[in-house]
Image (cartoon, grey):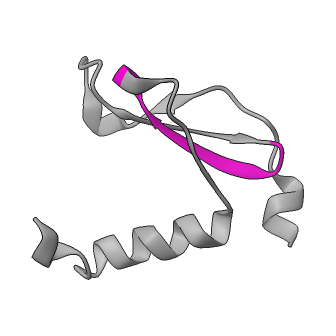
Amino acid sequence: MKCEASMRDSMWQKSSYSGASNECVEVRTADGAVELRESDEGHLILRTNLAALAALLHGIKAGEFDHHA
């Protein structure tokens, strides 16, 4: 688990695709996990590990979820 061991707690970062909008996805690392939230619902936080997030992003890029759009 080299990736998780090297992660440090960080500040929330918003997507660069959000521009000046306050409605965006934010991400940070905390306590060895990855946390995601919507900026307008900051109290709701999805917590996962790096491998699960990487698998999700890979699936999105591969179009595995396009039929839900």
Can you say whether 1 is above or below 29 in the image?
A: below
Q: Which quarter of the figure has residue 2?
A: bottom right
- On the image, the x and y values in percent for residue 23 come to 27, 25
Q: Residue at x 58, y 28 (%)?
A: 12
Quadrant where the N terminus lies? bottom right
Q: Which quarter of the figure has residue 41?
A: top left
Give the left or right position of residue 4, taking residue 40 as reference.
Answer: right
Give the left or right position of residue 63, taking residue 1 as reference.
Answer: left
Residue placed furthest toward the front:
44
Q: Is residue 62 located in the magenta-colored stretch of the structure? A: no
The answer to which of 60 and 45 lies nearer the viewer is: 45
Q: Which quarter of the figure has residue 24?
A: top left
Secondary structure character of the magenta stretch overall: strand
- On the image, the x and y values in percent for residue 67 come to 12, 77
Q: Residue at x 35, y 36 (%)?
A: 16
The answer to which of 59 and 6 lies nearer the viewer is: 59
- On the image, the x and y values in percent for residue 69 come to 10, 65
- On the image, the x and y values in percent for residue 4 come to 81, 61
- The magenta stretch is 31-40
Can you say whether 23 is above or below 67 in the image?
A: above
Give the left or right position of residue 37, taking residue 23 as reference.
Answer: right
Can you say whether 46 is above or below 54 in the image?
A: above
Q: How many marks?
A: 0
Give the left or right position of residue 59, taking residue 17 as reference.
Answer: right
Q: Residue at x 27, y 31 (%)?
A: 18
